[in-house]
Image (cartoon, rainbow, N blue to C red):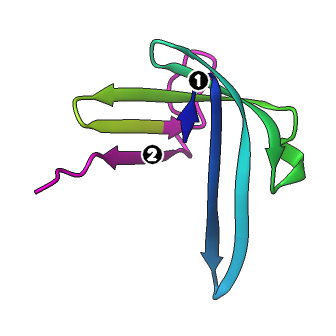
Amino acid sequence: MWAGNRWSLVGVFLEDSVITDNYAGGTFILDGNDYKEIVEFHSAPEYLGQTVPLFLEIRNDTLVQIWPVDENGDPVAEHHYMEKWVRMKSE
């Protein structure tokens, strides 16, 4: 979720039938497709205080988010994640 200059996420991970809470939030900076999250709270304490760079693009009804990225904003070739969110059309 985004509001103003703040972001947050809430969810759970399911791995090998173990459910783990996942939550985080803080502020963000967006410059073109260069997106950085400044982590103020997180369910994994090692992320606290970090600035996490991501690639973010909005095309029509689709938002694409990729991480981790290098200092140029390019996905790390050997290991990265991509999320695609598509707005649902109402009937």
Visible residue check, residue 76: no
**Mark 1 → mark 2, Cα distance in angstroms:** 24 Å
- Position of residue 41 in the picture relative to residue 27 (left or right): right
Quickly name the residue at label 1.
4
Q: Which amino acid, mark 2?
A: Met
Q: Earlier in the sequence, mark 1 or mark 2?
A: 1
Looking at the rendered image, the disc whose residue lies closer to the viewer, 1 or 2, is: 1
Mark 1 secondary-structure assignment: loop
Secondary structure predominantly adopted by residues drawn in magenta: loop
The total of numbered circles placed on residues is 2
The correct choice, above or below, for 72 with respect to 74 in the image is above
Res 82 label: 2
Which residue is at the front of the view, 47 or 21? 21
Check the image and name the residue furthest to the top. 31
Which span is picked out in magenta?
A: 66-91
**Relative image position of residue 30 (x, y in whole percent):** 55, 17
Where, quadrant-wise, is the N terminus in this rendering? top right
The answer to whether residue 84 is magenta is yes
Is residue 52 visible in the rendered image? The answer is yes
